[in-house]
Image: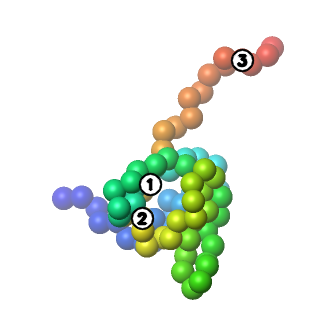
Amino acid sequence: MGHRIDVGDVIDMLEESQLMKRPVEVELKDGRVFEDRVQEIVKWEGEDHVVFKDHELTPLHTISGIRRGRPPELTYAGKRV
């Protein structure tokens, strides 16, 4: 049996993405899935919306699932000594 996601879980993950500057994978109720970083959470026209770095302003109620995105690949490539 899986964990049911609620609004609090979604907001926690979005705030973590914003604070830690880490990507999240977002699934929308219309079936679209994307990975992006959260810039901020705003209230617009009485409803919470998410401002993503590379995607459109997204109403919170349209998000059906969220999880941490790919962790950044740590590498020394390109690092100067």
Query: Mark 2 falls on what kind of element?
Result: strand
Location of residue 40 with respect to 36 vertically, above or below: below
- Amino acid type, mark 1: Val
x and y percentages locating residue 64 in the rendered image: 36, 63
Residue 1 image offset from top left, x and y in percent:
18, 59
Q: Nearer the viewer, residue 65 or 20?
A: 65
Label 1 secondary element: strand
Give, as a three-letter code, the residue at label 2.
Answer: Ile
Residues under numbered marks 1 and 2 in contact, where contact means CB atoms less than 8 Å apart: yes
Neighbor class of circle 2 (other Cα within 10 Å; few <14, some 14-19, many 20+) is some
Viewed as shown, does residue 20 lie left or right of 81? left
Pointer 1: what residue? 26
Callout 3 secondary element: loop
Q: CA distance from mark 3 to mark 1?
A: 31 Å
Q: Residue at x 65, y 58 (%)?
A: 39
Name the residue nearer the viewer: 5 or 53. Answer: 53
Asked which quadrant contains residue 2, the reply is bottom left
Quarter of the image containing the C terminus?
top right
User: Mark 2 highlights which residue?
Assistant: 63
Q: Amino acid at mark 3?
A: Gly
In this rendering, the answer to whether 65 lies above or below 35 is below
Q: Which residue is mark 3?
A: 78
Q: CA distance from mark 1 to mark 2?
A: 7 Å
Residue 47's image quarter? bottom right
Asked whether residue 35 appears in the rendered view, the answer is yes
The disc, 2 or 3, on the residue closer to the chain's N-terminal end is 2
* N-term-proximal mark, 3 vs 1: 1
Callout 2–callout 3 Cβ contact below 8 Å:
no
Q: Is residue 40 left or right of residue 80?
A: left
Q: Residue furthest left?
A: 1
Q: Which residue is the extreme one toward the right?
A: 81
